[in-house]
Structure formats: structure tokens, C-alpha cells
Image (cartoon, rainbow, N blue to C red):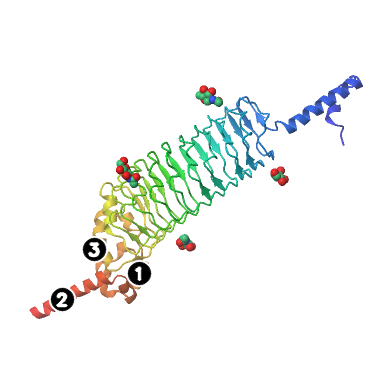
Amino acid sequence: MSSPWYFIIFPEKMSAKLQKVLVLLLMLLQDLQLTGASCSCSASTCHCDSQRLASIPQDLPVSITYLRLEFDNITALRTTDFPRYRNLHSLYLPRNHLTTIHSRAFYCLINLTTLDLRWNRLTCLGAETFIGLGSLEILNLDYNDISTIEEETFSPTPQLVVLLLGSNKLTSIPQGSFRGLTQLQMIDLFSNKISEIQLGTFSDLPRLQHLYLYQNRITDIQPGTFSNMTQLQILSLFFNNMTVVRSGTLSNLPRLKELDLDFNQIAEIQPGAFSNLPQLQHLGLGHNRMEFLPWTVCYQLYSRSRSVRVTLDNNPWNCDCRMVSSKVEMTKYCPSETIDQITCAGPAKLYRQKLQDVAPTDLNCLELTNAAADKHSLPCHFTYMLMFCAFAVELIAN
Ligand SMILES: *[C@@H]1O[C@H](CO)[C@@H](O)[C@H](O)[C@H]1NC(C)=O
Ligand SMILES: *[C@@H]1O[C@H](CO)[C@@H](O)[C@H](O)[C@H]1NC(C)=O
Ligand SMILES: *[C@@H]1O[C@H](CO)[C@@H](O)[C@H](O)[C@H]1NC(C)=O
Ligand SMILES: *[C@@H]1O[C@H](CO)[C@@H](O)[C@H](O)[C@H]1NC(C)=O
């Protein structure tokens, strides 16, 4: 409805010819702006977010050290994309449609320290993918569709400190995947489909502090899997399918502070499972399938310090005779906040009572239902037999 902007800005007295030339020039400039840098750039940074760009623009200042293209439409990274931008330290490409990284695409980016490829559609990482990234420290690959990591994928990136692979489709981690990453401090593998961890997967990571493996399908972890991880502080294993905590799997971790095993199917804790965790501050064992807590767990956890926070809620605790000796010893070593979380799921007459409130005489095996007696027949029958013998001896004596 109003006249075009270029008529408004020109004084009326200007000659018609000059006006035409100027208009042409301005239109040309406007066009250039659209095709070239819809990015906003300074000498050292460029932001090209939400421009529907289908490839890396090649007309940005070559001096940039920081480049960000978020919410664009890049599907592939090619060998020709980055040679102009050798000074890059940080490259952010989240929320594109990346499916392919051509071999040696990052070849020239020898000073790159941060690479963010979150929320793309990558499916496979190979030995050629990260070639050239010898300075890379942070690699974020969360929220892709990665199902395959080929051998030697991370060999070109020995300086990695943080490696994020959460919410992908990994079912296993090939042995040796992380070999040589001697600077690595954090690996995040949450929400994959990992069911098995091979012995040695994490054995060559002397600086690893944080290992996140939650929301996977891990059923068992072999003793020795975390040995020699002297710097490990956080080990997060909640929402997996573990049924047993084996001796020698989670013990001897001198710096471990957080051990999260909530929401598994753990029914058994083997002797010494938590021994020698001198720095432990939190142990999560809630929402599992434990019927019985060996008092030795209390002894291992609390013999050095009373400040460990343990969660034990939502387990089907069976307050039967096995708990008798355990409760007495438990009370010696575990603080009452810890024992207070044990709510009996059985036998029926103690249902929903707290173990704390159950009198030791109520924990005897004579009261056991047949079903519970079948499950723990040995110690219960043994108690029974002893009592019977005592009774018999008494009878004879009289
Ligand atoms: C993204 O790129 C693809 C092909 O490269 C094209 O078909 C699609 O229309 C583009 N989407 C947008 C939003 O530009
Ligand atoms: C990489 O960084 C080093 C040290 O800061 C510098 O000397 C070198 O010129 C940089 N190389 C490139 C290609 O930017
Ligand atoms: C732990 O380290 C020792 C000594 O460095 C080595 O002999 C042993 O094989 C390592 N164990 C594992 C499981 O890597
Ligand atoms: C893991 O546990 C979940 C929840 O109990 C179950 O639905 C799933 O089938 C289990 N997966 C495996 C691989 O055992």
C-alpha cells in the first residue's frame, strides 16, 4: 500500500537517472545479503542459526574461531566445507539433518577444541570421521541414531576430555573403542540399548571421573570392568536390568562418590560388593528386587564414615528369619535413616511394617508361610532343627 522503501529515502530533487542507478545498487546489495551472509559475524565469530542453510557458507571471514549453525538444513559435511576456516576452535552444528560426515571432512581443523553435533541423524562413526581433530576436547554426539562405532574411531582425537554419546542406538561398545583416550574425564552413554559391557572397555582411561550408563539394558557387569579407574567419582547405572552386584565389580574405587543402581532388578548383593569405597557419598539401591540386605553391606559402607546416603526404598523386603541376625548387626553399623527405609513386603503378617518396628521375636521362621519357606529353606530349616533339638534335649534332661 505504501511506496517501496527506496522511494522514501531518496530526496525528490535527485535526478531520475541517479535514482535508478542507486536503486539498482541497493537491490543488488540486498540480494548479496540474502545469498551470502545471513549469518551475523564479527572477525572471530559467526552465528548462522535458523537460516535453512543446506551447506556450510563459504563466504564467512576466514579468521573466525567460532562458528554456529543451529536449526539449519545441513545433511552432509564434505571435505571442501572447512579448509577456509582453519582457525576454528568451536564448531556448533546442532539440530540439522546430518546423516553423513564424509571422510576427512574435519581434516584441516587442527585447532578445533569443541564440536557439537547434537540432535542430528548420524548412524555410524568410522575411523576416518574425526581425522584431523588432534586438539578436540569436547565432542557432543547426543541425540543421534548412532548404532555403530567402528574400531579406531577416536584414535585421531587423543585430547578428548568429554565424550557425549547419550540417546543413541548403541547395543554394545566394541572393545578398544576408547583406547588411548588418556585425557578423557567424562563419558556419557545414557539412553542407548547397551546390554553388555566387555571386560576392558574402560580399562585404559586413567583420568575418567564421570561414567554415565543409565537407561540401558545392562544385565550383568563382569568383575574387573571398572578396575584401575582410580579417578572415577560418578558411576551412574540406574534404569538398567542388572540382577546381581558381583564381588569385585564395584569395589576398590578409591575416589567413587556416587554409585547409582536404582531401578534395576537387583536381587542379590554378593559379599564384598561395596568394599573399599572410601569416598562414597551416595549409593542408590531403591526400586530393585532385594528381599534381604546382608548386614555386611552396612559394615562395608559405614565402617569408615557415617555420612553415606543410601536409598533402599521400593524393594520387596522379606522380613523373615534371615533378617534376624542381620537386623541386630545392621543396627550396629547402619544409621537408623538407612534401616528406616526397609519396609517389609512379607511375610503377610508384617506387610508394610518397618523393619525398625518389628520385634526380633516376630522375625522368626516358625511364622513363615510355606511359599517363603521354600525360597529360603536352608537357614530356616536349620533354625527349626536347632529349636527341635533344644526342645528334645530339654525333654530328655527333665
Ligand atoms: C532441506 O534440504 C532438503 C534437501 O537437501 C530439501 O528437500 C528440504 O526442502 C530442505 N528443507 C528446508 C526446510 O529448507
Ligand atoms: C593453531 O593454534 C596455534 C597455537 O595457538 C597457532 O600457532 C596456529 O597458527 C593455529 N593453526 C591454525 C591453522 O589456525
Ligand atoms: C590394572 O593395572 C595393573 C597395573 O597397572 C595391571 O597389571 C592390570 O592388568 C590392570 N587391570 C585391568 C583389568 O586393566
Ligand atoms: C529390562 O527390564 C525392563 C523392565 O523390567 C523389561 O521391560 C525389559 O524387557 C528388560 N529387558 C531385558 C533385555 O531384559
**Which numbered circle lies on residue 389?**
2
Q: Callout 1: few (<14), some (14-19), or many (20+) C-alpha neighbours within 10 Å?
A: some
Q: Whole-percent x and y of residue 28? A: 80, 28
Callout 1 amino acid = Gly
Q: Quadrant of the N terminus?
A: top right
Q: Whole-percent x and y of residue 250? A: 34, 50
In the rendered image, the residue lying farthest to the left is 397
The residue tagged 1 is 346
What secondary structure is marked by label 1? strand
Q: Earlier in the sequence, mark 1 or mark 2?
A: 1
**Image position of 82 with respect to 255: above or below:** above
Callout 3 amino acid = Ser
What secondary structure is marked by label 2? helix
Q: CA distance from mark 1 to mark 2?
A: 28 Å
Q: Whole-percent x and y of residue 249? A: 34, 52
Callout 2 amino acid = Cys
Discs 1, 2 touching: Cβ within 8 Å? no
Residue 206 appears in the picture as rendered: yes
The residue tagged 3 is 325
Residue for point 25% across, 66% down:
360
Residue 253 appears in the picture as rendered: no
Residue for point 30% across, 64% down:
357
Tag count = 3
Along the horizontal axis of the image, is 58 left or right of 22?
A: left
Q: Earlier in the sequence, mark 3 or mark 2?
A: 3
